[in-house]
Amino acid sequence: MPEKPSLDGLEAVWVARWEAQGTYRFDRTKTRERIYSIDTPPPTVSGSLHVGHVFSYTHTDVMARYQRMNGKSVFYPIGWDDNGLPTERRVQNVYGVRCDPSLPYDPDFVPPDKPGKREVSISRRNFVELCHKLTAVDEQAFEDVWRRVGLSADWSLLYTTISDRAQAVSQRAFLRNLARGEAYLSEAPTLWDVTYRTAVAQAELEDREWPGAFHRISFHGDGGPVWIETTRPELIPACVALVAHPDDERYRSLVGTTVRTPVFGVEVPVLAHHLAEREKGSGIAMICTFGDVTDVTWWRELQLPTRPVIGWDGRLLPEPPEGVAAEPYKELAGKTVHSARERIVEMLRESGDLDGDPRPVVRPVKFYERGDKPLEIVTTRQWYIRNGGRDAEVRRRMLERGRELSWHPHHMRVRYENWVEGLTGDWLISRQRFFGVPFPVWYRLDALGQPMYGEPLLPPEDALPVDPSSDVPPGYTEDQRGVPGGFMADPDVMDTWATSSLTPQIAGRWETDDDLFRRVFPADLRPQSHEIIRTWLFATVVRSDLEFGAVPWKDVAISGWILDPDRKKMSKSKGNVVTPIDLLEQHGSDAVRYWAASGRYGVDTAFDAGQLKIGRRLAIKILNASRFVLGLGGDGGQVTEPVDLAMLAALAGVIREATQAFEAYDHTRAVEVTERFFWTFCDDYLELVKARAYGSDAAAESAHAALRQALDVLLRLFAPFMPFVTEEVWSWWREGSVHLAPWPATADGTADGTVDGVAGDPAVLAAAAEVLGRVRKAKSEAKVSMRAEVAGVTVAGRGVGLVRSALDDLRAAGNIAEFTLAEGDHDLTVEVALG
């Protein structure tokens, strides 16, 4: 035991020792019922962690530590989600490069020292190499923070979502989905981000308020002008029909006729559909291919032709759609959507087809959650997995899977069900990007060199992982790539969620280590935040159901967000994050963990630096109180004194309550009851027994034994929350690690019976603390020393018998000369005469 215990430097000492001693290594020899398996979230490796990550990951670690002390072998892997758009964007920003797949690989390429305004175009292979280089740096920084926080993960189980193992798992699962008809290739209208030039899935959408303007425009009918109102006049050349509600009397005579588009003069039909809104604008709308998702619905259900005008880059295509006059269209060709809108408005004014000035409006527009421009809808060929969006039976099954899970808190299941019930299409899993898991697919090329998409070429599972851009399909050679009669590689990569949805399989080494997989799957716990219920959680349920016909875990624990002082969600994109390293250095890891543990599952929590100060004060008090207790000596002896018995009985209640809280995934309640008792222990019990504990008789031995029993238990109760200070104190007098010690149990419990003397009455300690508190208050108000003598104390009312059991300790603690006790049927009263 050091002469002057300190929190400073504990993290470095114990992180190194835990790793060297393998304290948190998973013991795979345990049977499944003795294993607690966690499907840990792999954080996206792009930049730095923020305090919100520390908040939610601490919740998981607290449960892992509790289960380990409960005798479980804890399967607690850490993963990095290192492929996908965030990594690509970071590489572009850091190195000043942009991927151009048409360029050849340059083995001598070196990125510019100082990225300029113009990005350097490089080959896909060069770009992917830079992605690997940057993620390696970021991952090491992430690991350093997680170790400093004290995550009790088994680092030997580390995985990444771009590793060969993860790619093999992802490709294997896809090939099996394809073989069973659950994955399919389809050419259809797709939500498209023009900045990233990739398709976007429904789960990645968000509505944002976006300024625009309604333009009142005339179409030309035989009976005169037909006025429509639109915010997207640049799509007039993409118009394929007008649509009105079938019950709208204003347009009933028009339905079945045709009108001509302004400026371009294309003849389009007037049709009826129930989705047309009579109260919106003029009540009749133009259907374009495609302006929004309603256009897609009308196009599909009314079996309309396609006239695309928006390209993958967000500009109007260089050539007009079939049937659209080239002369007016050339005024729009190649322009951005914004510029095309400005020009078409000028043209409509010139032709007399614009009525008045555009009317400003702010309306919700769909964005990719990581994008900064509104999404367009373009027709592309994409891979999908059936998820219930188009199949009632699959939807029913996904809802049933959600009900099989235990949700913490329970109401989060509603978010899952609302998402499933609101699906409008299958899960789009392909992305037109570069740093991701490639689809293990090639296509035959016919005699004209055109791909035969209906005849995909697939690798055997034992060849995985494959990269079709550099590997060749069975039976072919490299010189047949891209030539008639040869083959071509599928150019896309999988959405990052298509791989992250397989984290239980990746971490559990599905199909490569069957023994391990049987021991850890299905997992016991999936911890995550609530905004990715629709993506990570749902997608994992889908993949598990399709492959195994089962849910991937038993319990789901949903953390809330960390909010800034203005109660807005902290996020790197908003620039309002607090990075954890400064907090860890200033307050210590245990203090940061204490703050994190104060947040319950499912509740958004405002960042509060004051909680960090409270946590540090608590950690220091644990050090100092422990030093006092252990400095008294006396490891043996029997607990005989009423106040000692009362304290241990109260502690037994704390054990029961904390254990029940943990079993209910309520870590906050567990730390609250432990902390409340600890301060009572320090402020009241220690003061009551201090004088007696300095003695050498049987009463002193009772105090020594009770103090050490209590310290032993309190260190274990605090250990999941404050691992560094508890391990430090444990090392002063106990063998091994506190984190491998058994979770404390009462004498009538099922564990090791560490708390004896539960026959004591906790009310004795409470009554004695009440009297001592009144004595202290009287001295404080009189502005005399706490050691000043008290002439007499009169205690009357119910509970006097409890006080009588503690008289000797009260006399010594309060320096009280005389006690007067009087029974009564009223609440306890205490009168203090200082003399």
Image: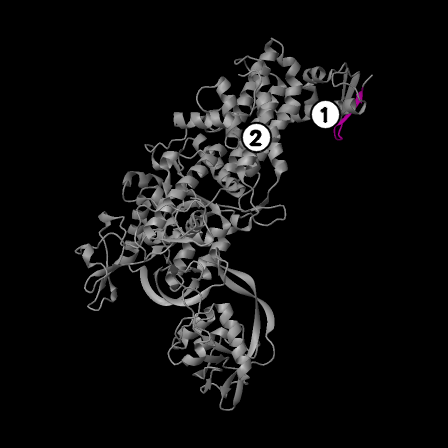
Q: What residue did someone put label 1 on?
A: 773
Residue 503 visible in the picture: no
Front tag of 2 and 1: 1
- In percent of width and height, residue 759 lies at 57, 23
Residue 160 visible in the picture: yes
Q: Is residue 827 magenta?
A: yes
Secondary element under disc 2, as helix, strand or loop, is helix
**Highlighted range, magenta:** 823-833
When the figure is inspected, residue 121 is found, relative to residue 565, above or below; the finding is below
Location of residue 506 (image quadrant): top left
Query: Residue type at mark 1?
Result: Gly
- In percent of width and height, residue 811 lies at 72, 16
Q: Nearer the viewer, residue 721 or 214?
A: 214
Q: Residue at x 29, y 60 (%)?
A: 181
Relative horizontal placement of residue 581, taking residue 466 as reference (left or right): right
Query: Residue type at mark 2?
Result: Gly
Relative horizontal placement of residue 160, taking residue 52 as reference (left or right): left
Q: What residue did someone put label 2 on?
A: 653
